[in-house]
Amino acid sequence: MVEETVPRSEKSIMRSRMDLREHCLALVREARMFKTSDDIARAALDLLQLSVTLDPEKEAQRIASLELAAGVLANHVWDWHVREERLSGKEDRPAFVAKYPMFSALNAVANGTKHPFPVYPDIGKAGAPKFIEWEHPDLWYSPVTRPTLMIEVDGQERSIHSLTHFFCDQYLKRAG
């Protein structure tokens, strides 16, 4: 049996498209990807995990980009934390920095990425990703089998991967 297709009117097609659009928008509103500061921290860790899957000999630039993006994203955990905890921001920031010491360095790198001013770390001097030496303080939270993006922060070369990973890991452990 052959079904006969009846062409729909243009108005009917437009109405169907609008219904579908509204349905999709409702789904997006209901299932926002980022609802909490924990979601932001996990997303930063996801970017780091993605960077580890890449071949450093072929994709060093992409690794550096993902690590830097993860650091900038992790920097915004503070903004979400303030909103969730209904904090005052400026008054509560010193306690946050004291609890999460890596945040200061991440914040400086994020600001240096956004504002290329001499008071911030110069990401333009970062160069190609490097392997971390055994004695380096960032060794334990960095990928030891491949190079990582290093940026000078407060006179010391720091691994963006390590700063981001350590901060996000500590932040996510706070509740449990």
Image (cartoon, rainbow, N blue to C red):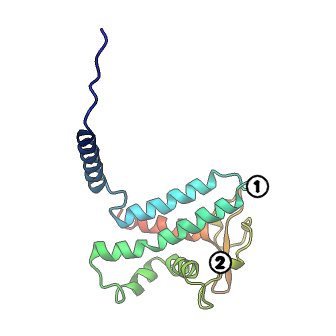
> What residue does disc 1 label?
57
Figure quadrant of the C terminus: bottom left
The circle drawn on residue 43 is none
Residue 69 showing in the rendered view = yes
Q: Which amino acid type corresponds to the residue marked 1 in the rendered image? A: Glu
**Element on which disc 1 rests:** loop
Residue 29 image offset from top left, x and y in percent: 27, 56
Figure quadrant of the N terminus: top left
Of residues 136 and 63, which is closer to you in this image? 63
Between discs 1 and 2, the one toward the N terminus: 1
Q: Identify which residue is drawn at 48% across, 66% down.
A: 168
Q: Identify which residue is drawn at 59% across, 91% down.
A: 119
Residue 55 image offset from top left, x and y in percent: 70, 52
Q: Identify which residue is drawn at 23% across, 42% down.
A: 11
Mark 2 neighbour class, 10 Å CA radius: few under 14, some 14 to 19, many 20 or more: some
Say if 7 sits above or below 37 in the image: above
Q: Identify which residue is drawn at 43% across, 68% down.
A: 171
Residue 7 image offset from top left, x and y in percent: 28, 29
Question: On the rendered structure, is 82 left or right of 151?
Answer: left
> What residue does disc 2 label?
123
Of residues 147 and 166, which is closer to you in this image? 147
Of residues 11 and 163, which is closer to you in this image? 11
Mark 1 neighbour class, 10 Å CA radius: few under 14, some 14 to 19, many 20 or more: few
Of residues 10 and 77, which is closer to you in this image? 10
Q: Which amino acid type corresponds to the residue marked 2 in the rendered image? A: Ile
Say if 116 sits above or below 16 in the image: below
Residue 62 image offset from top left, x and y in percent: 65, 60
| Alpha-carbon span between mark 1 and mark 2 | 21 Å
**Element on which disc 2 rests:** helix
